[in-house]
Amino acid sequence: MGLKLEANALECVRGGRMLFQNLSFSLEQGELLEVSGPNGSGKTSLLRMLCGLLAPSAGEILWQGTSISSLKEEYFKELAYLGHANGIKGELSAAENLRIAGGLAGRRPSEEKIAEALERVGLLDGEASLVKTLSQGQQRRLALARLLLGEQVLWILDEPLTALDSAAVRLVQSVLGEHLEGGGLAVMTTHQPLEVGAGRTVRLNLAPSSER
Amino acid sequence: MLATLRWVIQRDVTLAWRGRAGVLSTLFFFVIVVSLFPLGIGPEMEVLRAIAPGVVWVAALLASMLSLDRLFAHDYSDGSLEQLMLTPQPLSVIVLGKIIAHWLVTGAPLVLIAPVLGLQFDLPPGALLTLIGSLLLGTPALSLIGAVGAALTLGLRGGGVLVSLLVLPLCIPILIFGAGAVEASITGTGAEPHLSLLGAVLVLALLFTPWTTAAALRISMD
């Protein structure tokens, strides 16, 4: 049986304002869900819900037919999240960041794999400098390297292209393409349309209810 | 589970070491506050000996409040707290690791320097030993209880003061037993009952606060 992520009649209320309601979709292996919508339409909230960081006001999210709130750690094992903040520590070197992230995920990556992932995202000297001395774009690339190393099957990416140059955007395209071809699932918000060229793209537009 | 604890502790101790200034400020705060009393009161040994247990313990309490905002705030602002919450490990274990690391870098130095400060108050050797023992049992409990407050006030403006208001009342038993132990040792009535009670508080805190803190973090992230 293929892996499947489903959302059933999700509703999101933030600060007394209804952001979306009755939102349902289902995502299977090799599919990319591209969430679009203007600022403040609840894209990030939706993604945080899919991660289990935010409880939906109504509705439920199912992974393999089971609610993610009861799966918890089982679900987190399959999930990689890249949020607005990169979630990397400035006082550690790039390689240290990846080593610790891997160790905490319970699959300690080998040094070769770490070097490989860093090379793939164009950060050659992983040990040389602390991450806080790197540029915003380089830090985003490091966050991508964490995705590459993780081997999780479901990627949830919030604006992965922020601060990236055109070469890195192409890198995201090819990495995502490989992920989908390898049977992965991905959910992504973005303002720029991204041609992945692999798998199937499902588009979801979170327009404010008045414009719908 | 032990591997997770080890990774979290290693991570946080490394981070604290790379940003030593913040850790050292807690220690200096403790040293300076305790040292102000002999300077202010003058060389009246009887008075100093009588107030020593309370002074050292209150200073330790305030110093550990001061360091609480370091526990989650940095991880919260750079997004790594989200990542920690999404690792396939129980959040309470990660929280426990963070608290242990926090105690190692902020509480343990206080325990080590306290006997030196006790000399300023002319404490007898037996009382100095009790002081070390009581701080060794009490400061981890302070870190554990403080973590709940730190998690609850995460992301709030003026969280630092709020943490103290929330947590200080809960720490009063630790203060009473801790200072009581040293006092009993000075007067020679035996410190064991106080130390046993401190140990009981520590065990209770170890049992309950990691879960409470994890729940509080989930609420704060929502």
Image (cartoon, rainbow, N blue to C red):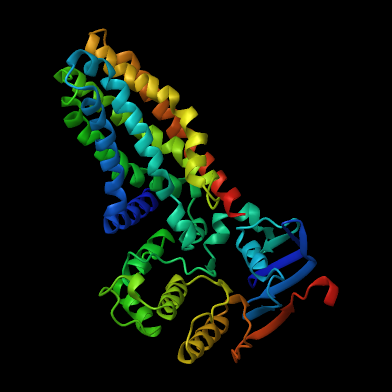
Q: Nearer the viewer, residue B201 or B2?
A: B201
Position of the C terminus of chain A, as image quadrant, is bottom right
Q: Nearer the viewer, residue A163 or A65?
A: A163
Look at the picture and state if A79 lies above or below B2. below
* Quarter of the figure with residue B42: top left
**Horizontal side, residue A205 vs residue B124: left or right:** right
Inspect this view and state whether residue A10 appears: no
Residue B65 rendering spot, x and y as whole percentages: 41, 39
Residue B19 rendering spot, x and y as whole percentages: 30, 57
**Horizontal side, residue B109 vs residue B9: left or right:** left
Q: Nearer the viewer, residue A85 or A150?
A: A85
Residue drawn 18% across the image and 19% down it: B123
Inspect this view and state whether residue B179 appears: yes
Look at the picture and state if A10 lies above or below B148. below
* Quarter of the figure with residue A195: bottom right
**Horizontal side, residue B16 vs residue B91: left or right:** left
Residue drawn 37% across the image and 38% down it: B64
Residue B149 rendering spot, x and y as whole percentages: 50, 40
Residue A66 rendering spot, x and y as whole percentages: 68, 58
Residue drawn 37% across the image and 48% down it: B2
